[in-house]
Image (cartoon, grey):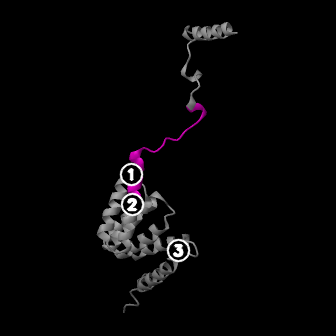
Amino acid sequence: MIITVVAIVVLGFALTLRPSSQPQTRSDSLRFNDLVRLRPRPSMATAAQAAEVQTRFAQGVTMLQMGQYDYALTAFHQVLKLAPQLPEAHVNMGFALIGLERWRDAASFFDTAIELRRDQMNAYYGLAVALEGQGDLRSAMGAMQTYVHRAKGDDPFRDSAEAALAKWRDRLRPEMSVSVAPPATAAESR
């Protein structure tokens, strides 16, 4: 029995050393990756980067809530350097810029957040506020109406959004009534 086992091992070894008469192509071989698809584990740099994004984002939100807009800008700037596709960071950068009354810059960040994620509701709200700051009430109303239309019924900012819309309509009402009136004729001006 020992002789049989040794003979099988030797014969198997000899067969592996003998060149094959048919070349083996890459598609003929079966690899582990063909059987099981594994997601790569995040590297330490990626994990550290994710931790820094979370830390900086939390710092930025805290600074934003405290009204420390310059510090919030610094924190969100760092977040966006590490995670430029994060719509929440763009939104919060926009709100920090609103705090500094940099309306045009704020609107740009809200626009980018909307491009990144169409259902980023607070971006529509912020965009409306930034457009109002620029004096563009019609566009502000459009952005806020989008917010109101898409926001859930129990959204905590829905009432303030509707109040802003009512205020802007009242401010535009005299302008709208003048533009709706027909032009005066030559006979009426005599």
SS for dot 3: helix
Q: Amino acid at mark 2?
A: Thr
Q: Residue furthest front?
A: 2
Tell me whether the residue at label 3 lies in contact with that at label 1, contact meaning CB atoms closer than 8 angstroms. no
Q: Amino acid at mark 3?
A: Val
Question: Does residue 51 lie above or below 162 as drawn?
Answer: above
**Mark sitting earlier along the chain (3/2):** 2
Q: Amino acid at mark 1?
A: Gln
Q: Main secondary structure of the magenta part?
A: helix
Residue at the disc numbered 1: 49
**Mark sitting earlier along the chain (1/2):** 1
* Relative image position of residue 174 (x, y in whole percent): 42, 86
Question: Does residue 17 lie above or below 144 as drawn?
Answer: above
Q: Which residues are magenta?
A: 33-55
Q: Nearer the viewer, mark 3 or mark 2?
A: 2
Residue at the disc numbered 2: 55
Residue at the disc numbered 3: 148
Residue 22 within the segment the image draws in magenta: no
Count of numbered circles on the image: 3
Q: Assess disc 2: are there few (<14), some (14-19) or many (≥20) residues with their C-alpha within 10 Å of its C-alpha.
A: few
